[in-house]
Amino acid sequence: MKSALLQTSQLTKRFGGHTAVSDVNLTVKQGEIHCLIGPNGAGKSTLFKLIVGTHEASDGRIEFAGQDVTSRRPYERVQRGMSIKMQAPSVFKELPVAQNLHIALQHHVRKSELAREEERLLALLDLAQDASKPAGALAHGQQQWLEIGMALASNPKLLLMDEPTAGLSPEETHKTGELIKRLNREGMTVLVVEHDMAFIRQIAQQVTVLHFGKVFSGGSIDEVIADPRVAEIYLGKKHEH
Ligand code: ADP
Ligand code: MG
């Protein structure tokens, strides 16, 4: 059996009187693409922030790569192998694409390997043609892929993404999915928060459905799609008896 890379137990986040994430037990296994889905306001982004450490847990526990990281600072979680593709652009728009990757890589790889790693990422991201363009001149989708490349620079154990397809065209969304699947085939474990069902069907292996801050359902993508209760919370349909 595959081992758990990330495990939350009774993870809870309260904002004043409001419980945004409630007793969440989530397991992301080594080597899987795991999607966190649920309607607007379900608590997905809050759970994501608890995992990466930008929110402090009110209760519960987070284990990552065999260690309790519940009280660890975000950078300490990164040191242990988490990497986050930010939703807001964090690329240096005036600098060339290759330079952006260079900056992301320089703290993580030996100087002698920098050029090779840079080329590897440019090819992976399909950005080799645009290596010398300022990042700001790239199409929106390409900037998102550059972000993913920068998140990969630390050679993480777990790649975390909150709505990586926000603002992308259907073609760009599909290409992002193929990139994630390729990374996964090469061994990367991925946790993605998403609401685009077509994209989820394209990439997800395991799915956890959040609703009102709680785990509503979970399992393989096929199981979750076949569950009429999941369609209900998405479409807001009432049960027909
Ligand atoms: P999702 O990402 O699934 O749309 P969120 O995690 O953003 O949901 O939000 C879950 C709930 O928590 C919402 O009711 C939201 O208003 C609330 N919430 C999120 N962040 C905060 C915050 N910083 N302070 C107070 N309430 C928050
Ligand atoms: Mg959100």
Image (cartoon, helix red, strand yellow):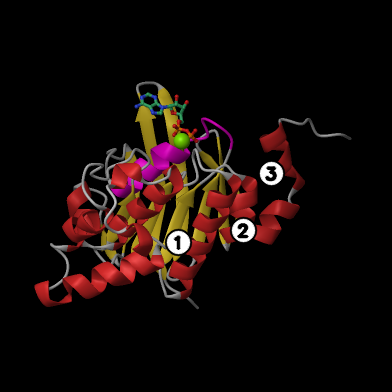
Q: Is residue 168 left or right of residue 63?
A: right
Q: Which residue is mark 1?
A: 28
Q: Residue furthest right?
A: 241
Contact between labelled residues 3 and 1, with CB atoms less than 8 Å apart = no
Q: Which residue is mark 2?
A: 202
In this view, the residue in front, 217 or 205, is 205
Q: Which residue is mark 3?
A: 230
Contact between labelled residues 2 and 3, with CB atoms less than 8 Å apart = no
* Circle 2: residue type: Gln
Query: Which callout, 3 or 2, points to the residue nearer the camera?
Result: 2
Q: Position of residue 108 (x, y in %)?
A: 16, 66
The quadrant holding residue 169 is: top right
Dot 3 falls on a residue whose secondary structure is: helix
Q: Sequence order check: which comes first, mark 3 or mark 2?
A: 2
Q: Is residue 231 above or below residue 237?
A: below
Q: Position of residue 99 (x, y in %)?
A: 20, 56
The quadrant holding residue 93 is: top left
Extent of the magenta region = 39-52
